[in-house]
Image: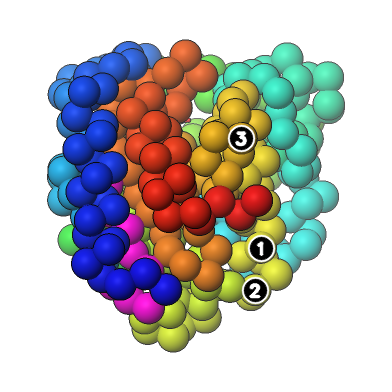
Amino acid sequence: MERVEDLAEIVAVVRRDMQAHLGRGRVADYIPALARVDPGRFGIALVTCDGRTASAGDAQVPFSIQSISKVFTLTMALEKLGADLWRRVGREPSGSAFNSIVQLEREKGIPRNPLINAGALVVTDALLERGDPAALIGRIADFLRLQSDDPSVAIDAEVAASEADTGFRNASLANFLRANGNLHSAVDDVLRVYFNQCALSMTCVQLARAGLYLANGGRDPVSLARVTTPVRARRVNAMMMTCGHYDASGDFAFRVGLPGKSGVGGGILAIAPRRAAIAVWSPGLNPAGNSYVGQMALERLASLTGWSVF
Ligand code: GLU
């Protein structure tokens, strides 16, 4: 295992090497509240399985985790339903956009995987099961507070409202799922939870800490609490590797070689099994919707550490 000063140096080198690229890519603007974020931001945090943290840049600045929340709701749903979840959602890369409707129609309302929007809506519905949306929003936020070991993690109400105002595509997906019998709760209730989970605001340090159980076989290595089983942690990692970067998941595996999940807020959570969880944030996105500089940074980190799983 690398020494702590090496880790500090590694994140410092990554940050230095990204300097010339800051501001590249396009900030997501289809959610108006996200469009205001400064594209020149960059943060990186790494938390190891033996509890050390190294960070650089804007690692303490909260950002909208967006689709990265899908990793955590998937963990919660697997804990609740076990393998039965896979009756309602597949586990193949989609090969199409994260919010594609065409594929869902062709495949009769069974989303390709839990990390595209349609799949995440089914996962959220499985957690909701006709219950109280406000209570579930609270449970998801509490899960992130517990895993990040930081009670200050909060939902950005403005982002959630902005997303609800413009979420016509997600509403279409939810209605379509409902029409196919693969959404059991009221469409508006599922959407409300989904928009709020996406609007969780976290820093790179909090996010890396929150994902640490995935690097450690489902057990938080610091608190020693069992978050999920080793098999389920492996399943979540497999989904991240094959489906975590929209239609560019293969490219991420090729370049970085770590399970990862990106969000349109410009964050990426990556897992180096048995070693560390890493979070990066830079708001400018590449054409596939993944953080332009964030992906470059993880590629650099993987080459400096040799942490690719391949
Ligand atoms: N809340 C966003 C949406 O559903 C999440 C997209 C993402 O980060 O991939 O459109």
Kindly tell me whether residue 295 is visible in this rendering: yes
- Region in magenta: 44-52
Q: Mark 2: give few (<14), some (14-19) or many (20+) Cα within 10 Å.
A: some
Q: Nearer the viewer, residue 298 or 233?
A: 298
Q: Is residue 152 left or right of residue 97?
A: left
Which quadrant: the N terminus?
bottom left
Residue that label 3 marks: 254
- Mark 1 or 3, closer to the camera: 3
Q: Is residue 223 left or right of residue 157?
A: right
The residue lying at 76 percent from left, 38 percent from top is 92
Which disc number belongs to residue 183?
A: none
Label 2 vs 3, first from the N-terminus: 2
Q: Between marks 2 and 1, how big is the CA–CA gap?
A: 6 Å
Residue that label 2 marks: 230
The residue lying at 54 percent from left, 34 percent from top is 255
Q: State the image quarter where residue 28 is shown.
A: top left
- Residue 57 x, y percent position in the rendering: 16, 43
Asked if 218 appears above or below 71 in the picture, the reply is below
- The answer to whether mark 2 and mark 1 are in CB contact below 8 A is yes
Q: Mark 3: give few (<14), some (14-19) or many (20+) Cα within 10 Å.
A: few
- Residue 256 x, y percent position in the rendering: 52, 40
Ligand 1's quadrant: top left
Which disc number belongs to residue 234?
A: 1
Q: State the image quarter where residue 303 is shown.
A: top left
Q: Nearer the viewer, residue 235 or 105?
A: 235
